[in-house]
Image (cartoon, rainbow, N blue to C red):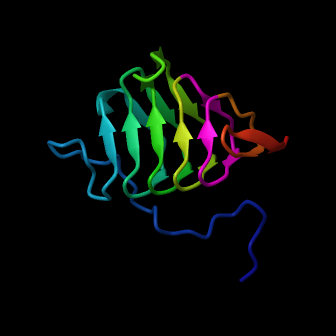
Amino acid sequence: MKIKKNEKTNKRFTSWKFPVFNKKNITRWNWMCQYHKHLVLGKNTDIGAFTYINAKYGVYIGKDVQIGSHCSIYSESTIDEKTGKVVIEDGARIGTHSTIMPGVHIGKEAIIGAYSFVKRNIPAHSVAYGIPARIAKP
């Protein structure tokens, strides 16, 4: 079988549905979102187990986004008292154990390396990693 460029072969999302949260704000895939009424998920998002999302001030996750396990996405930080909507655009990839801070915008198809701390915007189609995350490939 010949695969055309940009053709998706992954069939696991043929019937993707918005997740259901239990009384403790946890999905059946064991990721958690507080204030999930302020969470917008695009179709075919894949969020890893034990990821925590605080959507108090809004979190937008575009379609076909992949987020690794054990990540944290904060629209509110009680440590430095910052707040702001987090936007992760279509096709972005967030590596395992990464932290996204309030007000951050991650561009379309950007890649965040594992164990990164993201406190600044990341442009579309770039690669960033580290503590704090720095752009390695614009």
Residue 117 position in % (x across, y down): 60, 40
Segment tinted magenta in the rendering:
103-119
Most foreground residue, 119 or 40: 119
Q: Give the residue at the far bottom of this rendering.
A: 1
Residue 87 position in % (x across, y down): 56, 30
Question: Split into 4 quadrants, where in the image is the N terminus?
Answer: bottom right
What is the total number of numbered labels drawn onto the structure image?
0
Which residue is at a point 35% across and 46% down the rendered structure image?
Answer: 18
Q: Is residue 62 at all visible to an observer of this figure? A: no
Is 128 on the left-hand or right-hand side of 29? right
* Position of 23 relative to 54 (above/below): below
Is 78 on the left-hand or right-hand side of 132? left
Q: Is 116 colored magenta in this rendering?
A: yes
Q: Give the residue at the far right of this rendering.
A: 138
Asked which quadrant contains residue 32, the reply is top left
Most foreground residue, 133 or 14: 133
Most foreground residue, 120 or 110: 120
Asked which quadrant contains residue 74, the reply is top left
Q: Is 13 colored magenta in this rendering?
A: no
Residue 45 position in % (x across, y down): 48, 50
Most foreground residue, 66 or 62: 66
Q: Is residue 27 at all visible to an observer of this figure? A: yes
Main SS class of the magenta portion in the image: loop
